[in-house]
Amino acid sequence: MNHPENLLDAVRYFSDLGVCDAYMRRIKWPGGKITCPACGSERIGEIKTRHLLRCKDCRKQFSHKVGTIFEDSPLGLDKWFVAVWCIANCKNGISSHELGRALGVTQKTAWFMLHRIRRAMEVDGSDHFDGPSEADTTYVGGKAENMHAKRRAQVIQGRGAVGKTPVHGVLQRGIGDDPSQVRVSVLGSETQAELLRQVRSRVRHGAAVYTDAASAYGDLCLTHVHKAVDHSVCYVDGEAHTNGLENFWSLFKRSLKGTYVAVAPFHLFRYVEEQAFRFNHRLQSDFGRFFRRCRLYGDRLSRRLQGWPKKPPSPRGGERSIRSPRSWSVSQRRRLRRSVARSGVSEKCSRSSVNLGFSSLVRQVYQCPKKPPPAGAKKPSRRTKGGFYESPTTAPPPAPPPPPPPPDHLRK
Ligand SMILES: [Zn+2]
C-alpha cells in the first residue's frame, strides 16, 4: 500500500509502530538525514526494540515525536495517526468521548489529543486576501428560548447578541479552480475599531469587500471597495452578498450543536480553527487533509492550555505565605493533594491521605502550626459539637403551643 485512502486502510496501515516511525521520519526529515535535536549531529543510531533514536555524539535518546505536536506523549503513533485522521476528515468534528471509545483511551486523554491536533490546525493568518472578500460576524451562545425565564432576564438585555461570544470571519471568494478560503477569529470586544482591524489585517487594501449593513463597516470605504447589502431588504444585490460566509457559519454551528454541544468561550477559538481547516481543504482527499495536518509539526502544546486556572504554588517551594486556600477551585485543591501525595512531604501524606481535610493538608505541607485557641475559650465538648446531644447547660425546649379552640359547631 502506497498510502491509505480511507479510515479502514489507515487503521490497518498504521497498526505497526515500525511503519508509523518510518512514516514520521519521512515527514519530519524528508531528505533522509536525521539530526539530533540537542546537538544537531547527523550521526544517529536507532534502538528498534524501543522505537527510539540515539545520538552517537551527545548520547541523548529521542523519539520520532520530538519537535511535533505529539512530543512527550506516552501514546503510540498508531493511536495518534488514527486520531488525526478522524478529526481531519469528520465533517462535523468528533467528540472526545467518541474518540476515546474508538481508541481505547480515556475521555480526558482523547480531549487533550484533540486539542493538540486543533493547535496544529491553526492557519498562519499573516497572508492577505487579494480577491473579492466577504466579512461578517456571528454569535455563539445559548438560545434565549431555551433559558429559564430568570436567567433570560439576567442575560438578555437589548439585542439578542448580548451575552454571547462574537466570532468574526473573512472569506475570499473562489478564484478559478481555487475554492474560497476563510479566516476566522474569536473577538474579545465587538467595537467598530476591532471589526475594521480584522478586515484590514486580512484583506489587501483596495480589494472589494462585501458586508451586511452593519454601521461598523462604514469606514471600510476609506481603504477598500466596500459594498453592503441590507438583509432586511434582500440577501443578494448583484455581487454584494455574504452567502459564502453564511455557508461557513452554518457548517460551524452544526458542529457545535451536533457534536460539541457546550464549548467554553476561552476554548472556542480552537473549535473555530478546526472547522476553518476542514473548510479550506475541502476539495482534497481524506489522505490529503491528513497529510497536510501531519506536515504542520511545530512546538508541542503546553500541558496548561490557554485559559486554564493558575497552578497552586509548589508544595516543595517551602513558601509560608500562600494565597488564601479558600479562594482555590476544586481542581486546584485536587491537584495540590495529588502533588502532596507524590512528593512525600510527610509520611502521613501518603496515598491514603488524599482524603485528608484540606486545611490540615495545607498545614502539613507548609509546616504552618495550628493556631492555638484564644485564652479563656472553652473547648467545645465532642458530644455537644454536632448538636446531636443536648448539653445540660442549655435551656429546656419551649413548651408546645396550646391546642386551638374547637370550632363553634363542636362547642356545647
Ligand atoms: Zn546529539
Image (cartoon, helix red, strand yellow):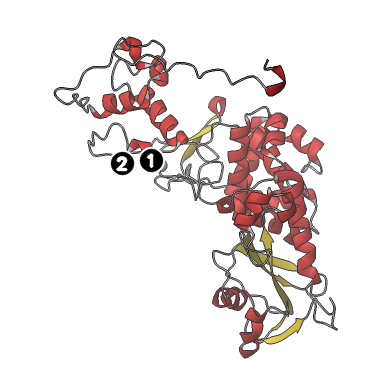
The answer to whether residue 178 is visible is: no
Query: Residue 382 in the image: x percent, y percent?
Result: 32, 11
Residue situated in front as seen by the camera: 143 or 355: 143
Q: Residues within 10 Å of mark 1 (few under 14, many from 20)?
A: few
**For residue 327, which numbered disc appears in the image?**
1
Q: Which residue is mark 2?
A: 323
Residue sitting at 62 percent across and 86 percent down?
A: 219
Query: Residue 198 in the image: x percent, y percent?
Result: 59, 73
Q: Do labels 1 and 2 touch, CB within 8 Å?
A: yes
Element at label 1: helix
**For residue 78, which numbered disc appears in the image?**
none
Q: Looking at the image, which residue sits at the far front? A: 412
Residue sitting at 41 percent across and 20 percent down?
A: 354
Q: Quadrant of the C terminus?
A: top right
Residue sitting at 77 percent across and 32 percent down?
A: 12
Query: How far apart, in angstroms, are the residues tagged by discs 1 and 2?
Result: 8 Å
On screen, residue 394 above or below 232: above
Query: Residue 117 in the image: x percent, y percent?
Result: 62, 46
Please tell me in which quarter of the rendered image ligand 1 is found.
top left
The answer to whether residue 157 is visible is: yes
Q: Quadrant of the N terminus?
A: top right
**Amino acid found under the numbered disc labelled 1:** Ser
